[in-house]
Image (cartoon, rainbow, N blue to C red):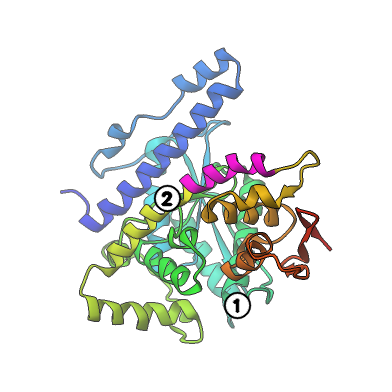
Amino acid sequence: MGPHPAVAAIRLAVRRVLHDVLTDLHRHAGHDRPAGTARRAAHAAPAPLAGAAAADGPRAALPERPDTPLVLVACSGGADSMALASALAFEARKLGVRAGAITVDHNLQQGSALRAAEVVTRLTAMDLDPVEAVAVHVGREGGPEAAARDARYAALDAAAERHGAAAVLLGHTRDDQAETVLLGLARGSGIRSLSGMADASGPAGRYRRPFLRLDRQTVRKACLVQSIPVWDDPHNTDPAYTRSRLRHEGLPALEKALGKGVVEALARTAQLSRDDADALDTWAAEAEQSVRDGDGGLTCAGLYALPPAVRRRVLRRALIEAGSPAGSLFARHLEEVDRLITGWRGQRAINLPGRVEATRQGGRLVIRQS
C-alpha cells in the first residue's frame, strides 16, 4: 500500500522541484563546461522523474560524489517546513541529491535557542546533512515582520553560499500565497504585489517553493500521519501581527461572506497577475533604453510618452539602481516621482527610502543617493 495521500502530495511536489533544480544544473553545466565534461555530467545524472515515483520501500543512500548537488530546506520547526524537510529527505536519495537544512533563530522569544537546537536534532534524525542553526539579530526597519524576514533571508543567503547549495526550499503554502495577495491589495502596491510569491526567486532562482499549490491542511496532515512533531509559533496567532490577524480573522470572514474557494481564487489571481507583471517588466526593460539621453539620464519627454504602467516600472528600476530598497518602495513613492513627469509645477526634490532623491532638472529626471 502506498503512502497517505497527503504524504504522496508533498513528496510529489518536492520531487518536481528537485527535478527542476537538477535540470537547471545540467543545462548550465552544458554551457559552462567543455563538451567532454558536460557529457560525463549527463551520464552521471540521476534517474529521471518517472523512476523516482516508485512505491515506498527500503531506501539505500546513493554514494556521494564530489559534484553531487546540495539542496537545503529552511525549517522553523512548524508543520509546513517539517513536512517539507521530511519530503526532501525521502526524495533526495532517489534523485542523487544531498539534502541539508538550516533553521534560523530570530532571538525574538524566550527559549528560542533551545527550540532551534530541538529542530536541529529532529532534522538530523531525518538523515539530513548538513544541519545548522543560525542565530540572527532582527532590526526595526520596516516593522517587526519585515525586519525578521530580512534577517532570515540574509542568514539563508549566507548559509547557501557557505555550503554551496544549489537551492533552498521554503515551505510556503497556497494559504500563505492567498495572505500575501491580500496584503499586497491592502497596501495598494500594484499588480506586482498581487502576484504574490514566485515558485522560484532570489539569486539565480535559489529559493524554491514546492508547496504553493498545496493547502496548509494537507501539509499539516502529512506531519500528523508520519508522527512528525511540530512547533506552533505563538507569533502566528498573535493579533499584534498583521499576517496573523489576516489569517485568523480576515480570511475566515471572507470565506464566510463569499463562500469556500477564496484561497484558491486568490492563488489563481497571484499567477495571472505574475504573468501580466512579467510581461510589463519586460516591456519596461526594453523601453528604458529609449528614454535615456546621451549621458545615461532619463528624459522627461521620453518618460511622459510611455504608458503609465510601463513608465512607473522604469522609474522603480531607476530608484532601486540608485540605492532605494525594493521592499521599502511603495505606490505612493512612485506616484510622487511620477508627478515630476506628468504634473510638473516646479515641485521640490522627492526624498525616498535609502536616502535617494529624485528631482527634475531641465527636462531630465535626476535620481541620486544623498
Return the residue found at the far top: 36
In the image, residue 185 lies at what x, y percent? 44, 70
Q: Earlier in the sequence, mark 1 or mark 2?
A: 1
Q: Main secondary structure of the magenta part?
A: helix
Kind of residue sitting beneath label 2: Asp
Residue on which disc 2 sits: 276
Residue on which disc 1 sits: 144
Return the residue found at the far left: 1
Element marked by disc 1: helix
- Is residue 258 shown to the viewer in this render? yes
In the image, residue 209 lies at what x, y percent? 43, 53
Numbered range of the magenta stretch = 279-291
| 3 relative to 360 in the view: left or right | left
Kind of residue sitting beneath label 1: Pro
Residue occupying the point 71% across, 61% down: 324
Q: From the viewer's perspective, is residue 18 above or below residue 43? A: below
Residue occupying the point 56% across, 13% down: 35
Camera-nearest label, 1 or 2: 2
In the image, residue 346 lies at what x, y percent? 76, 68
